[in-house]
Amino acid sequence: MIKLQLKHCGLPVLLCSSVLMSACDRKPDTVSQGDKIQLEDKVMQELITEPVKTFPQTPDDQHDIALLTDFDQRFSQMSDEMEDELVKMEDQGTLTDEFAYNRKRDNIYSALTMLKELDLKTEQGRYIQGLMAEYWQNQAKFYDENKEKTAEPIKNSANQTKGLGEFLHAQEQLEHWQSQYPDMNQAQAKKAEAAKSETTESGY
């Protein structure tokens, strides 16, 4: 499921890469080689996901799949735009640590707000919603508690990856659910392609 993880992680992958980079950029007397290896092992452990669970099909499946897929697409676009903005500002030399912190924190809280607004009707839908919300709640807690860097970068960095495996499991669960309704997937693909063509023709 590596392809799925890389495709759908978005901000989680961005956060984890920043975790590793920030830890490795510390002064040698602050972070030892053993600590770096420990952090890398922790991240890899978090990338191990549970097997996809089996749920009975219900008449509301497609309703929930559509809502979760829409959330995933909207949030991915939002995260991409945030990342592009930060990269552009960094290239221009105008990016500050405080601005980057606030933008990432706002993005995390946006994910939580969007998830809570989903009116999901099935057990499987709420299961996926719960896994995603738990991950973003952990990220929000991390950002709120660690605005100022402390003397324990490895411990804090490890905490930042907490729950990533569950988030990836939620993405795998959603993809498995989508695969049970191929006609729905084809309709969504055609809709997305039509919207893309319309945008191109309009010159935007």
Image: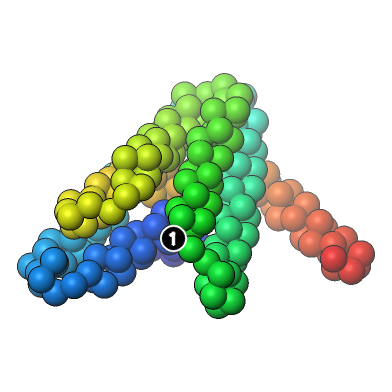
In which quadrant is the C terminus drawn?
Answer: bottom right
Residue at the image point whose x is 41% and y is 54% from the top: 12
Q: Image point 47% across, 46% down: which residue? A: 105
The image position of residue 42, as x and y in percent, is 19, 56
Q: Is residue 166 left or right of residue 41?
A: right
Point out residue 21 in the picture as x, y percentages from the top left corner.
Answer: 31, 69
27, above or below 195, in the image: below
Asked if residue 30 can be seen in this view, the reply is: yes
With respect to residue 35, does 88 lie above or below? below
> Colour scheme used in the picture?
rainbow
Most foreground residue, 28 or 18 = 28
- Residue 183 in the image: state x and y as whole percent: 68, 46
- Label 1 sits on what residue type? Asp
For residue 144, what is the image quadrant? top left
- The extreme bottom residue here reads 91
Seen in the image, is 126 located left or right of residue 24? right
Who's the residue at 30% across and 66% down the image?
A: 22
Where is mark 1, residue-wise? 97
Q: How many discs mark residues in the rendered view?
A: 1
x, y percent for residue 169: 37, 45
The quadrant of the image that shows the N terminus is bottom left
Above/below status of 108 relative to 115:
below
Q: Is residue 176 visible?
A: no
Residue 118 drawn above or below residue 181: above
Answer few, some or many: residues within 10 Å of disc 1's Cα (few below 14, many 20 plus, some between 14 and 19): few
Question: As drawn, is 110 to the left or to the right of 22?
Answer: right
Which element is circle 1 on? helix
Farthest residue, direction right: 202
Residue at the image position 82 percent from the left and 58 percent from the top: 194
